[in-house]
Amino acid sequence: MTDAPAPPRWTRRTLLAGALGFAALPRPAAAGPPARIAALGGAVTEILYRLGAADRIAAVDTTSLYPAEALREKPNVGYLRALSAEGLLSARPDLVLAAEGAGPPDVLALVREAGIPVVSVAEAPTEAGVIERILAVGRSAGLEREAAALAAEVRADFAALAEERRRIRQPARALVVLSLQNGRVMAGGRNSTADGILTLAGAANAAAGIEGFKPMGDEAVIAAAPDAVVMMRTGHGAATPESVFAQPALSQTPAARRHALVTLDGLLLLGFGPRTPQAARELMRALYPDLPRG
């Protein structure tokens, strides 16, 4: 009696390709720039639209809120940090262009195994970081000339913003509050996008004692003594001074006495895309209403 042939050895790649069908199988690399891009991250999607590549976007994620037609017209593959390989590959991209932190990492590894390049775009919350993000997206999409032009435009806007910022004599202490859940203040500390936008707007971060986005206890909020509170405007409606400063800790701050609450669109405020100079300018003018504009 002869031995039975050994069963085939299945890899994650062949299992995934089999589950998704022929559409998910690797394709030969196309000559020229990518024609179908999965844009993951609000700033990545916004930059691609600004570069004139809207017709090459094959899919977006739920953070791609600007321009509004992105989510309205493009397939949505889910939340940036909770993606699925099936969802991504079903869009048949020839490039996945993802903001730093997209994942989970094993999902992106599966996409790479299926033969799709995945490029991570750094997200440093600084002026230089915004410019490099624009140029990096342009390089990946084969739109270097368009990216250079957009970068020059944004760089000039940052320069004009810096001139306005020089007129500030006494920086305001501002607290960027990401959420208020169960009476706990989730705030943006140093090395966060919140810290970055406050710096560009000429304000001091009242939460500089913490790293990243973290909850702050009541005593820490009171000790931070913010002159103003900054929050994201969501689809559920903007927070009001009455609701925000009813929070026990925030009610004991200089911001509460002034009813100083600033709300801005979330992606505009913390997205660090091409509109960041606009976001910083709007925040600056809200914090310093009497600042000469030149």
Image (cartoon, grey):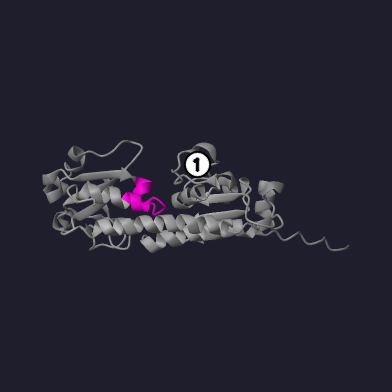
Magenta range is: 266-279
Expressed as whole percent of the image width and height from the top left, the position of residue 198 reads 27, 56
Does residue 59 lie above or below 5 as drawn? Answer: above
Which residue is outermost to the front? 294
Question: Is residue 129 among the parts visible in the rendering?
Answer: yes
Which is nearer the eye, 249 or 266? Answer: 266
| Left or right of 69, for residue 187 | left
Does residue 55 lie above or below 134 as drawn? Answer: above
Which is nearer the eye, 182 or 193? Answer: 193
Q: Residue at x 66, y 47 (%)?
A: 20
Question: Is residue 102 among the parts visible in the rendering?
Answer: no
Q: Amino acid at mark 1?
A: Ala
Q: Secondary structure at mark 1?
A: helix
Residue on which disc 1 sits: 70
Per the picture, the main secondary structure of the magenta-coloured stretch is: helix
Quadrant in which the N terminus is drawn: bottom right
Which is nearer the eye, 128 or 39? Answer: 128
Mark 1 Cα-neighbour bin, 10 Å: few <14, some 14–19, many ≥20: many
Q: Residue at x 23, y 50 (%)?
A: 293
Q: Residue at x 24, y 45 (%)?
A: 262
| Left or right of 102, for residue 92 | right
Does residue 35 lie above or below 6 as drawn? Answer: above
